[in-house]
Amino acid sequence: MMKYPIIITLSLCMLNTLADRVTYSFDDSVGLGRHFDGIGGLSGGGATSKLLVNYPEEQRNQILDLLFKPNFGASLDILKVEIGGDAQSTDGTEASHMHNSWDENYERGYEWWLMVEAKKRNPDIKLYALPWAFPGWIGNGTRSPYTNPTQTAMYIIKWIQGAKQYYNLTIDYIGIWNERPYDITYIITLRNMLDNSGLTNVRIVAPDGSWSIASDMFKNATLNAAIDYIGCHYPGTYSTKQAVNTGKQLWASEDYSTFNDNVGGGCWARILNQNYVNGNMTSTISWNLIASYYMNLPFYRDGLMTAVEPWSGNYIIESPIWLTAHTTQFTSVGWKYLRHGSGVGKLNGGGSYVALISPDGKDFTIVIETFSHDHSICIRPPLPKYTVSPQQIMIDLKGSFAGVTQLNTWYSKPSYSTGVEDIFFLKKAPLALTNGQGQLDIGVDEVWTLTTINTGVKGSFPPPPASAEFPLPYSDDFESYMDSQEPSNLAQQTGSYEVFNSTSGDHGKIMRQVVTEQPVSWCSAEKLNVSLSVIGDPQWADLYIECDVRIGNVNNTDGAFIAARVTQGGCQTFEAEGVYFFIFPSTNTIKLSNDLAQTQVVFTGSFTGFKEWNKLSLAVHAKLATAMINGEKVFTQNLTGKANEGFAGLGTSSFGLADFDNLAIMNIDDGLKRMEEIRVKKDTKLYFKPGKF
Ligand SMILES: *[C@@H]1O[C@H](CO)[C@@H](O)[C@H](O)[C@H]1NC(C)=O
Ligand SMILES: *[C@@H]1O[C@H](CO)[C@@H](O)[C@H](O)[C@H]1NC(C)=O
Ligand SMILES: *[C@@H]1O[C@H](CO)[C@@H](O)[C@H](O)[C@H]1NC(C)=O
Ligand SMILES: *[C@@H]1O[C@H](CO)[C@@H](O)[C@H](O)[C@H]1NC(C)=O
Ligand SMILES: *[C@@H]1O[C@H](CO)[C@@H](O)[C@H](O)[C@H]1NC(C)=O
Ligand SMILES: *[C@@H]1O[C@H](CO)[C@@H](O)[C@H](O)[C@H]1NC(C)=O
Ligand SMILES: *[C@@H]1O[C@H](CO)[C@@H](O)[C@H](O)[C@H]1NC(C)=O
Ligand SMILES: *[C@@H]1O[C@H](CO)[C@@H](O)[C@H](O)[C@H]1NC(C)=O
């Protein structure tokens, strides 16, 4: 029992399983491994940074510092962003820079802003861009981006050039089509057109899918030459022999996607090491960068940190931030890994270690992780069982580092038991080395960084404001936005909404749905050709929503709606249920439907009083829905749908232009007062209290 007294402070049960001491040598004299390309975060794919943009500036800057500022927080090396394609790409739609072939605009969405903020904090951060979907005109109606490779490549090149022209941003890496088939001719065309446009510096990552492209790279030398990096998604830390044999750098160009509690942190720390140890991958990119999308949208909180309350300013620094810092604060892009067996490998007692060396050979960093199976499960792929035990290891520095006498030591141990505090990114006493050797006792579920670098910082701020519910009453007249901006808090799920200067009446700025045809989609969200934007709290039950709507007669939609209790977004948007109040002015028709698809219509009526702009009101109270148009009551109906709660929403019944203004959302009591206020004919009873039935 007294053999390892130091362990007692950790846990008694560890004593039984303590492995015999094993020596691990770190030696650059036998040659080096691969070039380190950095750790990144992915904003988009889709709309995952939606709620970040309208945070109060103070908290927003803190969050951006925690993500991007060197030597402070996650200190990311790569920012990957979505090139918006006007289509749902997981948690929302991001706007295209070319909604139509005649349209070009570099003010839309938030990825430009985010890239600028990242570069402000770290001018060396690498930028990587990838489309998920394309607007419908790409491919000339064939619904494929590869029918007309020149057209698609030009569309992508315009985005890259726009980044430079409008934001002085240099895009380092460009992808093909996220998790969709690649096309050899397109990749080669893109390479040629980049080169011919003076963009030789922009390197291609392909295919953002599986490793199997390696087989085509062996068959086609032109393709092989066009691709600089093979990017695989969710590789489960393994690549293929064929991919390794291409000699190209291999990336986990999208990985993680796991709920960001401490098990998510364990997943992240394990793959950051083991993607290299098992799979020779030199970059790992987290989907997503930051969880800034509403609860109840798919993959809630699968980001490095959480920021979902722009109205309160509350945010949460989750474990992946500090587990990233263990690598990023003590390495840089351009460092090299040591070789497997002389600085990279698995620990005998479970866990893994990597070591990296700076290009000038002066600095050196070792990262060790010992996450147990159950505390490091990622969302995909399945993780085979394995065991990890406490272990005593001997670090043995050789080669250039044989003379190092101490290594700075940083330590994390997330807690998986109540009453035990998390330890994140704690600077410990340096590890002393004698003749290059030093002993370390390591437990289970830990990360250790041992480094010659002296500059690590656990950045911190005063606690953010307290968490709060989405504030009601809520209103937006869209007057405060610049043209082309996407309004705050309205999380578009299908279709794309942006602020326009109204061309008629006294509406000033308005919000317009601008997608006029089905996009070249990434998933089936758009299969009904319906657009939907959601807002607020997914647990709202009783609610009042009001909005002015105009359906013009140029490239227009046939109908529009406002809604409550909208049950879902994401790729399943097409099956969202809720309470939808539709208007179809061209046929003087109104509808109440239990679903977005209008397959569960409760009521169809006629209304002849439509004007250019129409003020729609919808009150949803227990099992009753009451609606008005321009202050005229059009129905009170018993609700028959299953949806008891959900977001507020608005949208169009087909793709095509529609304008929205003066959105207001209130709790039901305020809403009923509001309805009485704006009601024009008071001859009938407005509303029957649900208690009466
Ligand atoms: C497809 O569209 C592009 C750009 O609008 C145009 O130049 C080209 O001629 C079209 N091709 C076909 C086959 O229609
Ligand atoms: C554009 O960015 C580069 C760095 O990439 C910088 O050197 C240059 O000064 C910037 N130009 C402007 C006009 O801001
Ligand atoms: C590579 O693929 C392209 C596009 O399919 C084809 O035109 C070219 O001939 C191929 N090159 C080689 C070397 O096989
Ligand atoms: C790739 O990783 C394996 C271990 O999985 C290692 O043995 C090999 O040396 C590595 N090869 C290259 C080229 O990085
Ligand atoms: C909006 O339109 C009005 C009237 O045409 C014009 O005075 C105003 O400058 C426009 N605003 C913007 C931002 O374009
Ligand atoms: C949606 O639009 C596409 C392309 O215009 C069309 O092919 C498809 O039939 C439409 N689907 C529905 C359900 O209207
Ligand atoms: C409507 O579509 C036509 C092309 O079909 C386009 O030229 C025009 O600019 C569009 N108008 C609006 C307001 O989008
Ligand atoms: C709603 O349900 C109540 C109770 O069943 C019934 O009396 C009333 O007529 C219904 N209203 C409508 C509009 O169907």
Image (cartoon, rainbow, N blue to C red):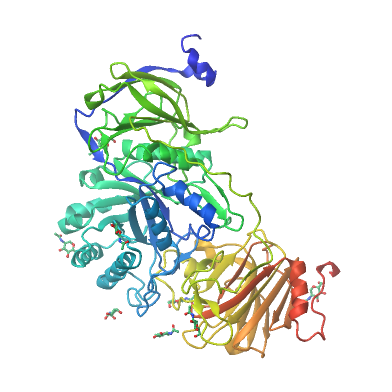
For residue 181, above or below residue 3: below
Residue at horizontal 49 percent and vertical 12 percent from the top: 5
Q: Residue furthest toward the top? A: 2
Residue at horizontal 28 percent and vertical 55 percent from the top: 205
Badge count: 0
Residue 596 placement (x, y as % from top left): 58, 71
Q: Quadrant of residue 334?
A: top left
With 683 as the anchor, is 19 left or right in this view?
Answer: left
On the question of residue 273 being in view, the answer is: yes
With 586 as the anchor, is 104 left or right in this view?
Answer: left
For residue 684, above or below residue 194: below
On the rendered image, what quadrant is the C terminus found in? bottom right
For residue 600, above or below residue 324: below
With 638 as the anchor, is 649 left or right in this view?
Answer: left
With 601 as the anchor, is 516 left or right in this view?
Answer: left
Nearer-the-camera pick, 208 or 482: 482
Nearer-the-camera pick, 446 or 122: 122
Q: Quadrant of residue 217?
A: bottom left
On the question of residue 624 being in view, the answer is: no
For residue 468, above or below residue 489: above
Residue 469 placement (x, y as % from top left): 66, 56
Residue at horizontal 41 percent and vertical 53 percent from the top: 42
Residue 391 placement (x, y as % from top left): 42, 21
Q: Quadrant of ligand 8?
A: bottom right
